[in-house]
Image (cartoon, grey):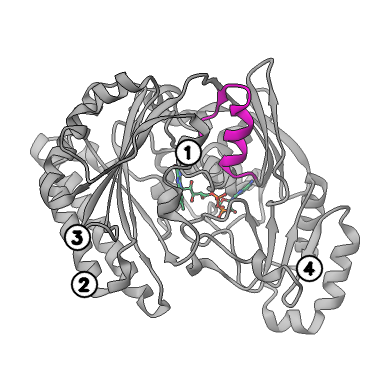
Amino acid sequence: MGSLGAEIFDQVSAEVVNKLRKSLKASTVYTPGDEGYAASIVRWSDAFEKKAAIVVYVRSPEDVATTLKYCQDNKINFVVSGGKHSVGGTSSIEGGLVIDLAKMRDVTVNEADKTVDVGGGCVWKDVDEAAGKYDLAAVGGTINHTGVGGLTCGGGYGWLTGRYGLTIDNLVRAEVVLANGSIVEASDNNNQDLFWAIRGAGQCFGVITKFTFQCHEQKDPIWSGQMVFKADEHLDAVVNFANSLMAGKNPDAAMLMGITAPPFVRGPAIVVTAFYNGPKNAGEAIFEPLLRLGPIKNTCDERPYDTMNGIMNHAVEYGGRKISKGASFVLPLRPTFVRELVEELTFLHDEVPVTKRSILLFEFYNNVEVVKVPTSAMSFANRGWHQNALMGPNWSDPKDDEKCKRWLAHMSTQFRNELDRIGIENGNLAEMQTIGEYGNYDGTGVAPQEMFGPNYARLTELKAKFDPENMFNSSYDLTLPA
Ligand SMILES: Cc1cc2nc3c(=O)[nH]c(=O)nc-3n(C[C@H](O)[C@H](O)[C@H](O)COP(=O)(O)OP(=O)(O)OC[C@H]3O[C@@H](n4cnc5c(N)ncnc54)[C@H](O)[C@@H]3O)c2cc1C
């Protein structure tokens, strides 16, 4: 399908757009020049702010269906936008149409079965706060301005993963507008094959206008917060602690280890975000080896779950150019390897001095619940005992785009080499080579065959069934041969 480019838009805009406006029941349409247009194309990363020809703030599944038909009839390329945190620009488009779900942010808590119905354009703050009022919590993202839509479509790791698995493991049903305009339920009872596909590759199968999640009782506060250490003093101790935390397999304890360069520390710093779903004394006992190191800064305390998911927001707000790449590592993580990566981060700081807000993130979640679900159960294919890492350069000038992307590629190779090294050392290289990466952290366009591994062939079959014209193609091309 050809794209409606800016020049075509200039010629036919009024006619084309008026037709659309008239056909929609309650949605709002913006085009360049309209008040509100500039705000409508803002994305979490400035690198992905693209000049769409038309932005439609849809307000109902019916209007989504109408917009899809309109795109088909007028041969207009489109993307779907949820929370706007795509790390690869898959929710923005140059010259095409954006189906923006940002006005579909209703949340309804169903007390009887402890589920929550969530509008397709919600961010996690909407869910955390609504569920929190009923002492309930969902497995959501760790930054609460992130979108429910993209995060759920691609899997979803969060603080409650250790206890309850991934976000998709807690998805009960979804309302999906398919390419042909039909509005269907995907669940264990209806359209099971679609349900299989959307739990991992949801963004390739339709517009999800409502998610229903199983929530969990969360009456008590969480002991959590951030501890900051100088990397050159405490890196080995922090990494060794993280390894022992994971060896303990406590489903209620987790941590993130971010390496960055905050302005109040000279040189790279380690920012540990600690999580324990329990009382302060127990949390302090578990994290005592870190507390004993004497962090430069320590904000750990008891706080409600819905507040917990906002404590890292300040580090990853909107603004600046960002792209990220995922990687995987196995436990125990080698301090020497991390030290090498910290050096690579300082090389980036030297080469592109405005990259101090860049981050290297290592996640430590107990994966027991994640691996309980077979890889074949849903299209998501990143299950295993490995952990996720994320490399996230943050810069400001488009002229540095290529340097930052080169750095990402180089860092990605370092992670891959480390897995290979371990595989050779332990005699399980073939197994190490099956470890992929978390798709939602990839902004570099990893091939879908690689991302979905053993599930890819089935995905292509279902793609042919539910989206034969490959209209939902901005993140992966699932028509490529297996
Ligand atoms: C600051 C930050 C923190 C993050 N933290 C976490 C975390 O804790 N855990 C985790 O697992 N991941 C995390 N991620 C990764 C996150 O899951 C992805 O960036 C995800 O794509 C964001 O979804 P979104 O709706 O905000 O983004 P968008 O840019 O709006 O959408 C991303 C993709 O999903 C599609 N999409 C969005 N909504 C829908 C919908 N309703 N129906 C169909 N398709 C849709 C879009 O078309 C696009 O392809 C984080 C990312 C960032 C930038």
Task: Tell me the quarter of the image containing the N terminus.
Answer: bottom right
Residue 369 is situated, as x and y percent measured from the top left of the image, at 40, 23
Q: Residue at x 21, y 24 (%)?
A: 247
Q: Nearer the viewer, mark 3 or mark 2?
A: 3
Q: Quadrant of residue 340?
A: bottom left
Q: Position of residue 443 (x, y in %)?
A: 43, 58
Q: Earlier in the sequence, mark 3 or mark 2?
A: 3
| Secondary structure found at label 1 | loop
Residue 139 located within the stretch drawn in magenta:
yes
Q: CA distance from mark 3 to mark 2?
A: 14 Å
Query: What distance separates the C-alpha of mark 1 from that of mark 3?
Result: 28 Å
User: Image point 29% across, 57% down: which residue?
Assistant: 262
Task: Check disc 3 and report the residue beneath it.
Answer: 266
In the rendered structure, the answer to whether residue 345 lies left or right of residue 335 reads: right
Answer whether residue 172 is visible to the viewer in this image.
Answer: no
Q: Which tag, 1 or 4, sits closer to the chain's start?
A: 4
Q: Point out the tag, 3 or 4, that comes first from the N-terminus.
A: 4
| Amino acid under disc 3 | Arg
Using residue 270 as the reference point, say whether residue 159 is left or right of it. right
The residue that label 2 is drawn on is: 350
Question: For this view, does 112 lie left or right of residue 183?
Answer: left
Mark closer to the observer (1, 4) = 1
1 and 4 marks in contact (CB < 8 Å): no
Q: CA distance from mark 2 to mark 1?
A: 32 Å
Distance from label 1 to label 4 (Cα)? 42 Å
